Amino acid sequence: MKHFLIVVDMQKDFVDGALGTKEAVAIVPSVVKKIEEFDGEIFATLDTHGENYMQTMEGKNLPVPHCIKGTEGWELDKAVAAALEKKGYTPVEKGTFGTAQLPAMVMNACAGEPCDIELIGLCTDICVVSNALLLKAIFCESPISVDSACCAGVTPEKHMAALETMRSCQIEVK
């Protein structure tokens, strides 16, 4: 069986930058440990916006410029980046919460073999849940899980609500 770890948007702007939270900062050591101990293939998503962010639908609804490609805020958290570089990973740039590109890349990497998929990262209630549900729709017979200790939401309450949503959709919450 192939094993996949999806590290979602562990970028500076979500950890301690424009949209950072103390909860996001607190999960960094757990995320690094998970990456270091993982035995399988790793994909890391990167929320990626352009200078026109404020004119996009997302920018109109969340008027906080963040993860503008090429800026410091777009880069992975330094500790997470170091762990990923050491293990090896495939970056996946995405322009919105979830991306259909990710399931396609995992499908290609599976090469027809059975697999399991675990997600970690930020934000539980936006990008983690979006990508988890996309993956569940495609890999409906594969075990998909999320490590709640390696995720943080916009607020602790939204984090818990997203975990409940994923449980309802048969995603294992660890």
Image (tube, grey):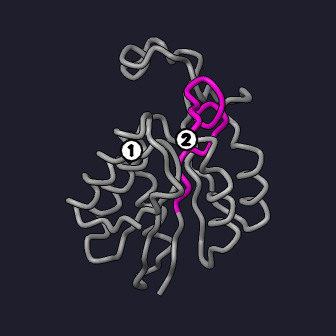
Cα gap from disc 1 to disc 2, whole angstroms:
10 Å
The residue under the point 39% across, 67% down is 145
Instruction: Assign a secondary structure to mark 2.
Output: helix
The residue under the point 42% across, 35% down is 155
Q: Residues within 10 Å of mark 1 (few under 14, many from 20)?
A: many
Residue 79: mark in rendering: none
Q: Position of residue 106 (x, y in %)?
A: 47, 66
Corner quadrant of residue 35 = bottom right
Q: Which residues are magenta?
A: 6-22
Taking depth in this image into account, of 1 and 145 the one nearest to the observer is 145
The residue under the point 68% across, 29% down is 73
Instruction: Assign a secondary structure to mark 1.
Output: helix
- Residue 146 within the magenta-colored segment of the rendering: no
List the residue tagged with mark 2.
Answer: 23
Q: Does residue 122 lie above or below 113 as drawn?
A: above
- For badge 1, the amino acid type reads His
The residue under the point 44% across, 52% down is 101
Taking depth in this image into account, of 29 and 79 the one nearest to the observer is 29
Q: Position of residue 67 (x, y in %)?
A: 60, 29
List the residue tagged with mark 1.
Answer: 159
